[in-house]
Image (cartoon, grey):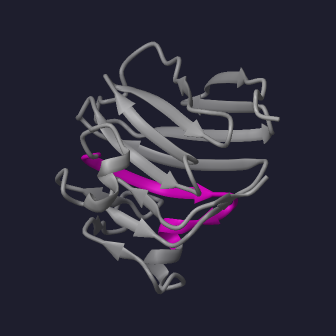
């Protein structure tokens, strides 16, 4: 199974794509070290390896932070990256910090109704997706809210067709879904 992605939206979404989404405030905060299927996208943009991207977010200085963070200073800033290909397995990793309790961190639309989204809802990470079996979601199981202005690490995985994992700061949630599509 291949998820054909045209554009990955990090931190926000293009206004013309909003008609397909429920209203979610955009992410305001810092994001660093964004990795999707072993590609270090923020590093690639920062170093010029990705020529076609649109950014209204600001790339931060390298002082005191190991990984080059991108700062989203308002709900109107975003980073649009070229098409990503998500296959039957995927691995996504990033770090973030914010003081905002709600925000869309990542949205990636595919063909038809397919999508992947990562949201901060009431201070907790929600991984929401439709990869052909209808919309599904996984919520982080951290004990405290993540909008504490501290860096948090997020790893999302799809080790097999029907298994999804969400790990936030070493707290892992595993969910299996049975496909109803024949």
Res. 21 image quadrant: top left
Residue 12 seen in this snapshot: no
Q: Is residue 1 magenta?
A: no
For this orientation, the residue located farthest to the top is 143
Please state, as top left, top right, bottom left or bottom right, where the C terminus lies in the image: top right
**Viewer-side residue, 154 vs 132:** 132
Q: Which residues are magenta?
A: 27-43
Q: Is residue 25 left or right of residue 81?
A: left
Q: Is residue 40 magenta?
A: yes
**Where residue 94 sits in the image (x, y, percent)?**
52, 49
Q: Residue at x 29, y 29 (%)?
A: 148
Q: Is residue 174 above or below residue 117?
A: above
**Where residue 108 sits in the image (x, y, percent)?**
50, 54
Q: Is residue 21 left or right of residue 86?
A: left
**Where residue 121 sits in the image (x, y, percent)?**
35, 27
Q: Residue at x 36, y 21 (%)?
A: 145
For this orientation, the residue located farthest to the front is 182
Count of numbered badges drawn on the protein? 0
**Viewer-side residue, 84 vs 45:** 84
**Where residue 36 sits in the image (x, y, percent)?**
62, 57
Q: Residue at x 19, y 50 (%)?
A: 75
**Viewer-side residue, 75 vs 144:** 75
Q: Is residue 152 above or below residue 75?
A: above
Residue 7 seen in this snapshot: yes
């Amino acid at each position: 199974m291949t998820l054909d992605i045209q554009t990955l939206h990090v931190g926000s979404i293009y206004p013309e794509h909003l008609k397909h989404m429920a209203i979610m405030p955009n992410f305001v905060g810092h994001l660093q070290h964004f990795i999707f299927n072993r590609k270090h996208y923020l590093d690639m943009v920062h170093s010029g390896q990705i020529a076609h991207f649109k950014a209204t977010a600001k790339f931060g200085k390298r002082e005191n932070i190991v990984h080059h963070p991108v700062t989203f200073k308002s709900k109107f800033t975003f980073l649009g990256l070229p098409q990503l290909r998500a296959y039957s397995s995927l691995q996504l990793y990033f770090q973030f910090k914010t003081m905002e309790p709600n925000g869309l961190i990542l949205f990636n639309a595919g063909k038809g109704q397919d999508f992947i989204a990562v949201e901060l809802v009431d201070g907790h990470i929600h991984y929401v997706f439709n990869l052909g079996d209808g919309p599904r979601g996984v919520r982080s199981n951290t004990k405290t809210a993540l909008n504490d202005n501290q860096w948090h690490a997020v790893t999302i995985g799809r080790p097999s067709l029907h298994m999804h994992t969400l790990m936030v700061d070493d707290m892992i949630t595993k969910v299996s879904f049975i496909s109803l599509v024949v």
